[in-house]
Amino acid sequence: MSIRTEKVASLLQQELGAILEKELPRSSALSTVVDVKVTADLGIARIYVSVIGTEEQRTAIMAWLHDETKYLRKLLSAKIRHHFRRIPEIEFFEDRIYERASRIEQLLREVRKAPEQHD
């Protein structure tokens, strides 16, 4: 990524994080904007969201994000319009990195607990 796209991605991550904190439906799930990838022409921003909660909560939050993409882009536009001529289209993707990391940690703990077996 170029310096420009990195700066745009960082700004979008910060602003979308604040927007989602206020706009997401209240549930016991924790949602975080983990990463933002912006195309070289700044036309599309891929937003990676981590949702920690039950499968139903993850599904509901991701469905809400997809349904409300236009509304969220409008809110984003109101916050950052002085930075851009054109606000990128936004696409939401679920990032399950924390879930995978937890599983790896669990497996490592199990391996450490298992007594050493010699053949």
Image (cartoon, rainbow, N blue to C red):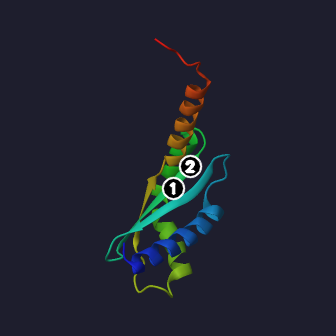
Where does residue 84 sit, x and y in percent of width and height?
44, 85
Q: In this image, 58 relative to 30: left or right?
A: left
Where does residue 85 sit, x and y in percent of width and height?
41, 86
Depth check: 75 or 5 in front?
A: 5
Which residue shows up at 34% across the image and 74% down it?
43
Depth check: 62 or 46 in front?
A: 46
Where does residue 105 sit, x and y in percent of width and height?
57, 37
Q: Kindly identify which residue carries mark 2.
A: 51
Where does residue 117 sit, x and y in percent of width and height?
52, 15
Q: In the current view of this chain or complex, which residue is farthest to the left?
A: 41
Q: In the current view of this chain or complex, which residue is farthest to the top?
A: 119
Which residue shows up at 56% across the image and 49% down it?
51
The Cα–Cα distance between marks 1 and 2, rounded to whole angstroms, is 6 Å
Q: In this image, 48 relative to 110: left or right?
A: left
Identify the secondary structure beneath mark 1: strand
In the rendering, which numbered label is found on residue 15?
none
Depth check: 111 or 53 in front?
A: 111
Q: In this image, 42 relative to 102: left or right?
A: left
Which residue shows up at 51% across the image and 44% down it?
59
Query: Residue type at mark 2?
Result: Val
- Rate crowding at label 1 as few (under 14), some (14 to 19) or many (20 or more) other CA atoms within 10 Å: many
The correct choice, above or below, for 4 with respect to 48 in the image is below
Query: Residue type at mark 1?
Result: Val
For the residues bearing labels 1 and 2, Cβ distance under 8 angstroms: yes
Q: In which quarter of the image is the N terminus?
A: bottom left
The mark total stands at 2
Q: Kindly identify which residue carries mark 1.
A: 49
- Rate crowding at label 2 as few (under 14), some (14 to 19) or many (20 or more) other CA atoms within 10 Å: many
The correct choice, above or below, for 34 with respect to 8 in the image is above
